[in-house]
Amino acid sequence: MGVIEGETILVKRKNKFSKSHVIDGAPTLEYDEKRDEKPWQRVMYKVTRKGTHLHEPVKSIPAAVLIVLLGVYLLLAYLTQLVEDDMPRVINELDVAKDNSETFSEEAAWRYLHIIQGTEPRVSGTKYHLQKTKVLKDLLDSIAEQSNLLIRTDWQVVSGDYWLTLSIPYVNMYQNVSNIIALLEGESGLHPNGTIGTSLLVNCHYDSVPFALGTSDNVIFCAAMVETLSKLSRRSQKLRHNVIFLFNGAEEMALHGSHAFLQHEWAKGVTNVVNLDSAGMNGKPIIFQASDTRLLSIYKRVVNRPNAQSIGEFMFANGIIPSDTDFRIWRDFGNFHGLDIAFMKWGHVYHTRYDHHDMLKTGVIQNAGNMLLALVPAVAGDAELETKIEPSAVVYFDFLNWFLVSYSFGASVAVDLLVAIFGGLSVAYYVWVVGPSIATVQELLFTVLGRLLSMLAGMLVVTIFVPIMVATTVQLRYLAQAWLVVPIYWLPYVITAVCVAQVFDAWRTKKCSFNRCIRAMQAQAATRLILAVILIIMTCIPNTMTVRYFVTVPLFIISVMSLASLTVIRYVRLEAWQHLLMETLWSLPSTMFILTLALRFCAMMLPVMGRNASDTPDYLVAIINTGIAVIVLYTISGIELLFSRKHLWIVVAPVAIACIVLMFIPFSPYQDEGPSVQRHYWFHSEIISYNYNNMETERVAGIVVTKHDTYSTSRVLPALSEKGINLEYRLDFREDCERYVHCNLPLFGVWFEPLVDSLFMYTGPPAPFEPDNTISLSSRICNGNVCTFDFIMIGPDHNSLTIWPRENVNLTSWTFDSPVKSSYIQNDRPVYIIYHSIATYSEVFAPMQFSVTVSLKWFDG
């Protein structure tokens, strides 16, 4: 620019001034500036110059195109779902040569599935469970007879007990657990002294809950294990390590089968474990717990469609997922470390009658089998796995099932900080491109404020609508209609955030001369700055290690893409629509990554709300989905400023109205003819009370209905009334919960928390047990203030025993192997819970005999 000073014009270029004289009103050069400039100065000027087009106006995109853009990203979400659901081609048995040990056949696995599953639930301790145990043993023996390699099989029957640490811990006692085991002998083999060499343990469970066939939980993996064993048995050369295929018979009854296996001689050689389970059906099985990085590295190398998210560890550790697997036993009691893999999609069918083979989709077993048949021999052939290592925390995630990324806890700190710094540098690059000055930085900080205000405004709108929906309509509608989370949580946030961003931008446009493209880039830079700060804060919180990649990955991708966008904008004048196309293309990797996480997270968490006793589950779902919407919108932040503000309300109003209408349509949460059914747990019970003289004082019979979702109990009575059944009932047990153990109801442990809101309907007593369940005192021996009581308990195959000593009485020892620990405190008195299970059927259940020793405080001194 020029500043007139008498007859002299000072021409400023950066910090360099050249002087000209004015003759007849026209400036003439006093010297040849180009000749005076050095070559490197001319090059630097060309590289660092800012194009004049940065301040030239750019015609905006009509607001109506926003609808098209929304449709593009919804289509992208659909395509991402297709990638998630894609399954490999099914391979038939005839397509696999007899000597082929590397090709898994879904057709063969289906045959094994039907053999193992049968036609009834396989509840441990029942006659049908015993029958299928024999069938499974025969199946493995038949494979062993035709094997090229040595396969040893065993039917383990064992008893024991241990202290199980859950939200309400208790003693877990089992009798006669049945485990069917096949050992594929490797080079490590069995030693002459009877000990076993290094071994990989692969575990599934073949028992089921009482009301399900358990196709997914867990016969799919058991069938895949049998087919994997069959294929590996065709090998001509042994693997380096033994492979133990454990088909445990009592997982559903508090993880008894896995703990029982620890008493087996073969357990002493186990160095690593691959645990296989399910909390859903269909989709790809996912790694959600990993405690040995070596196995994770092998998985990454050999599995073609990796599926793993370390956020699962965070959710399990914090009790967000109300389930557990045998991995707890391997880790806490066996010191076995490795991978925990499970099906997570379709959680609606988990532990329901819909866990049935008719619901299983084609290709699901093939995909799971391909993974297992690639992983097992790779692990069993790895020389590094000859010794155990200490478990280590690790971050891992896959990108659209294409590849897997993993790194250790220590590396995660470095990775996250470096990505945060890189994000900050990408912001600095923006400042450098548009011109480093106080005004540029100030305007950037204003934009940061605008981004935060738009985010908070979006959250506020969702926060306002959710309580209104909870109060006026039906909760849990997303159980049957998962897509509803988009119009009732995502879009209200997006619409509000976009509108507030446009209003804020209109205010700032009057303060600066940047065109739309630069303002869009400025908004993106502000977003990266916010994410970088968030990531730095999260890095200071160690417990967030396994979830920080939710921020790290998109920040890294959008920072890389911003370098390309800024460079293009610097040298090329783009129209707004051209800029939009470029940014939309750049956003695909980060957006698809976040959409993948969103789809998996919702597929896992939405069904969980159907077995959550909360009165307001929609609040948690709203928090989760609004958080996801925030991250998704951050991957495309800024492009909304390329659109015209004129008539914006005409565009967003119909979408907003449609969302509001859907918010208040009372869709049913359940499907009468589908997998999304309401969970009910009914217990036909008789409660008999005795006094200290063992005389009966009260007898009450009825049906206990526990609360597992917000409508579990409230809908029972109207449904019965419609059928002409009207019973006396009781709903509020709050007073009983304060006075008595387990609210004076015949349930314990995992059932304890929702007992206060249970429904009790008075009916006749259940059919009597044969023999009648009783507990009797066989002897009492006292020596001073110490007394020992011997008891005999006769009952069915599954029982619970609660000991609640009176005041001034201390329980000091008992005959169980588990330490004397209280499960919880009731009225300042410790409560001791023992869960007992006879896990293999017999015509006569042997009585359980045990002793407890107590000390009486009033004799002290």
Image: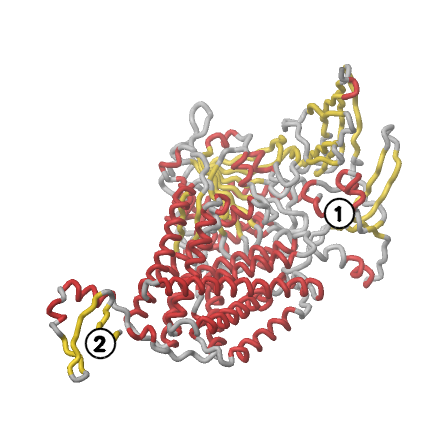
At 49% from the left edge and 41% from the top edge, which residue is drawn?
202
In the displayed structure, 654 sits above or below 706; it is: below
Q: Is 707 left, or right, of 266 in this rendering?
A: right
Does residue 685 appear left or right of residue 254 in this picture?
Answer: right
Task: Inspect the image, locate mark 2, and give the three-letter code of the amino acid beneath it.
Answer: Gly
Residue corresponding to mark 2: 6
Q: Which residue is mark 1?
A: 756
Q: Are marks 1 and 2 in contact (CB under 8 Å)?
A: no
Residue 36 x %, y %: 12, 67
Q: Residue furthest bottom?
A: 24
Question: Quick one: quadrant of the N terminus?
Answer: bottom left
Helix, strand or loop at disc 1?
helix
Characterize the local packing of mark 1: few (<14), some (14-19) or many (20 or more) Cα atoms within 10 angstroms. many
Q: Could you tell whether 791 is left or right of 169 in the image?
A: right
Place of residue 125 in the rendered image (x, y in percent of width and height, measured from the top left) = 67, 39
* Residue at (21, 66) in percent of width and height: 16
* Mark 2, other Cα within 10 Å: few <14 / some 14–19 / many ≥20: few
Q: Nearer the viewer, mark 1 or mark 2?
A: 2
Which callout, 1 or 2, points at the residue further toward the start of the chain? Answer: 2
Along the line of sight, the residue nearer the viewer: 518 or 304 = 518
